Image: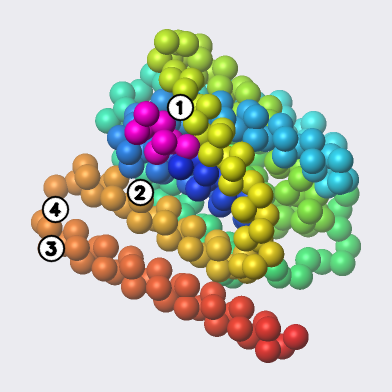
Amino acid sequence: MEKLIILAFVGFCAQLVDGALGMAYGVTSTSLLLLSGISPAIASASVHMAEVVTTAASGVSHIKFGNVDRQVVKRLIIPGSIGAFLGATFLSNVPGEIIKPYIAIFLLSLGFFVIYKFLFKINKKQPTQLKTTANSKQLAPLGFIAGFMDSTGGGGWGPIATPVLLTSHKMDPRKVVGSVDTSEFAVALSASLGFLISLGWQEVAFEWVIALMIGGIFAAPIAAWLVKIIPSILLGTLVGGVIIITNVRTLLGVVIISKTLTLMIYVALFILWIAAISYAVHIVRKRKNET
């Protein structure tokens, strides 16, 4: 019961982040699950099964409000699903203790990317001439890579696909987010099938999946409220720091170094995180003064 409560809290925090920022559900939840001692394969499988429900609801909402480029979704779904299935199969057949440090490195890099994205990229003006469709030759490898990394790392579809579409194809930002979120349903479903086939039904604790879903349901309205009162640039910086600290802890657990050096690493990261938060607050105040 204690673990189920923790998992519900993980799902709550992850949905809080994803609902407020539009990304990082998988990265946040997988990072917290790894920290609690769950193996990478089981953690990623649980997250993706929970995402089947959350992404379906998100996709329906985006379609309803006209935030989806159907051509982009069609071109992302097949390569993304194949990549996700192969990634799930790969992760399921690698011993957890061997793959865990590499997954932590991937998630750590995504943590830095989240901070960079929200500090320096978010809210920048887009070109006035926007393309309505994207090049299918570029979408296929993007979908495959993002799907594979999403399964092996427990997150990465949004953080990888969204910025590439924004920078490469100059699409309308709301259609980029809507198209990526909608196509993620197929990716999550394919990853879940891959994990079920590779791990077997008996290896998956479905009560964990349900706990993640329940936590996410309660977080959804709170996340919507947070979007109104907390600037996205500040939320992104806060979340990126949590992801970095969490995965650094996982990495330091498999590296033999002195306690003094470990403490110095934590202090350095904490100082950098405070500096990033301070800069984010400065940007928020500057924008308020300009308006």
**Residue position marked by numbered label 1 in the rendering:** 208
* Residue under the point 50% across and 78% down: 279
* Image: 59 above or below 158: above
Q: What colouring style does the render use?
A: rainbow
**Residue pushed farthest bottom?**
289
Name the residue type under label 4: Ile
Frontmost of labels 2 and 4 is: 2
Name the residue type under label 1: Trp
Frontmost of labels 1 and 4 is: 1
Please tell me which of labels 2 and 4 falls first in the chain.
2
**Residue position marked by numbered label 2 in the rendering:** 247
Please tell me which of labels 2 and 1 falls first in the chain.
1
Few, some or many C-alpha atoms within 10 Å of disc 4 (few <14, some 14-19, many ≥20)?
few
**Residue position marked by numbered label 4 in the rendering:** 257
- Residue 141 at least partly seen: no
**Residue position marked by numbered label 3 in the rendering:** 260
